[in-house]
């Protein structure tokens, strides 16, 4: 399990991340300058979390507490992956290396690591994480710069690319799973309420997302607990 | 937004995200067994992404109509098996077509 094999296995993830983070860069350019948007990608490496974070930054009423709670719930699944990955790594993958490489735990990198035969070495995991990280940062950089240069109508059109990708992640599992449909329906119904019901419109963007996601997921976990572990099944980018 | 506030936000966001990955990676040895919490964590990405997309996509473009149409075409493209990039392109082309046409007429 060498560094080079990791690089090779990570290259398709890197290409995919470039496309997603390009859209993030475009969306971010509406709020921040391109170096600041790129710095978010270089320090976070998480699509949904970064996008929610960006919305909280853009919201004049957003607070740091909201940022902490939103990041916590949106990225909580990485803890689950980290736990399961900690069983899969070899004996030389010590605490220091784990602290350095923990940022590489994303949906796709985790899924590829778990699909390997035998234990995962630190070298392989570093190789596997490298191109996705580079793709994620460069895509954001490119998107951020394009977002500042291109006319508003084009960036608005490109801005829906990220939503398009979110839709492409959510819809396929809905086809095969009625509980997922219910979860999505509850989340959307709550999200619409926060926007259109006057009594709820005082809730800030970040808390609205947290409440929608946590309530819908709790309800469905209670009524439709999953039999299979399935924790590597979703195709979310980063 | 001023730089000081930006760096505070960035520090909180990156710090929480990093700790969620690093702490269980070095400390926990057992697997989460509870089907309830496993299911909860499995649903989270889908509910987060849904809540972030609707109704925000309606307000992301020059007109309400193009936002609504982008949602519809993206869902259809995805139902027909389109991948991440394909569905994203379909949504962008929809918005360009509708908002572009609105400029012309």
Image: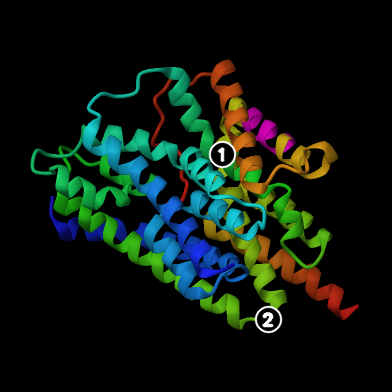
In the image, residue B79 above or below residue B59: above
Please identify the quadrant where the C terminus of chain B is shown. bottom right
Q: Is residue A92 above or below residue B11?
A: above
Q: Foreground residue, A149 or B24?
A: B24
Residue A153 at x, y percent in the picture: 72, 75
Instruction: Please tell me how crowded label 2 is: few (under 14), some (14-19), or many (20+) other residues with Cα within 10 Å.
Output: few
Quick check: marks 1 and 2 in contact, CB under 8 Å? no
- Residue B82 visible within the image: no
Q: Give, as a single range, the part of the protein colored magenta.
A: A181-189
Q: Is residue B85 magenta?
A: no
Q: What's the residue at 86%, 73% (across, down)?
A: B102
* x 60%, y 53%: residue: A56
Q: Which residue is mark 2?
A: A151
Image spot of residue B101 (x, y percent): 83, 74
Which residue corresponds to mark 1?
Answer: B46
Pick out the residue farthest to the right: B105
| Chain of the residue under label 1 | B
- Residue A163 tag number: none
């Amino acid at each position: 399990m060498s560094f080079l094999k990791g690089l090779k296995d990570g290259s398709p993830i890197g290409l995919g991340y470039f496309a997603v983070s390009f859209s993030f860069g475009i969306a971010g350019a509406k709020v921040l300058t391109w170096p600041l948007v790129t710095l978010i990608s270089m320090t976070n490496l998480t699509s949904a979390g970064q996008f929610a974070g960006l919305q909280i930054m853009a919201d004049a009423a957003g607070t740091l507490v909201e940022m902490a709670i939103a990041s916590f719930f949106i990225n909580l699944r990485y803890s689950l992956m980290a736990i399961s990955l900690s069983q899969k790594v070899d004996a030389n993958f010590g605490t220091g290396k784990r602290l350095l490489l923990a940022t590489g735990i994303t949906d796709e990198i985790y899924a590829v690591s778990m699909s390997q035969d035998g234990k995962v070495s630190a070298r392989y995991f570093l190789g596997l994480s490298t191109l996705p990280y580079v793709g994620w940062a460069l895509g954001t950089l490119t998107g951020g710069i394009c977002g500042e240069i291109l006319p508003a109508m084009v960036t608005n059109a490109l801005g829906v690319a990220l939503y398009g990708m979110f839709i492409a992640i959510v819809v396929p599992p809905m086809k095969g799973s009625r509980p997922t449909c219910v979860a999505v329906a509850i989340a959307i119904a709550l999200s619409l309420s926060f926007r259109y019901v006057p009594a709820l419109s005082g809730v800030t963007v970040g808390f609205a997302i947290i409440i929608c996601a946590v309530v819908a997921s709790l309800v469905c976990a209670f009524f439709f607990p999953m039999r299979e572990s399935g924790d590597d099944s979703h195709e979310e980018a980063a | 937004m001023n730089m000081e506030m930006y760096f505070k936000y960035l520090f909180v966001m990156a710090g929480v995200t990093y700790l969620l990955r690093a702490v269980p990676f070095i400390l926990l040895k057992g697997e989460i067994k509870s089907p309830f919490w496993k299911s909860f964590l499995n649903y989270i990405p889908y509910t987060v992404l849904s809540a972030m997309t609707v109704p925000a996509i309606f307000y992301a473009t020059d007109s309400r109509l193009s936002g609504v149409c982008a949602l519809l075409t993206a869902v259809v493209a995805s139902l027909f098996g389109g991948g991440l990039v394909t569905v994203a392109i379909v949504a962008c082309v929809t918005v360009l077509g509708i908002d572009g046409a609105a400029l012309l007429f």
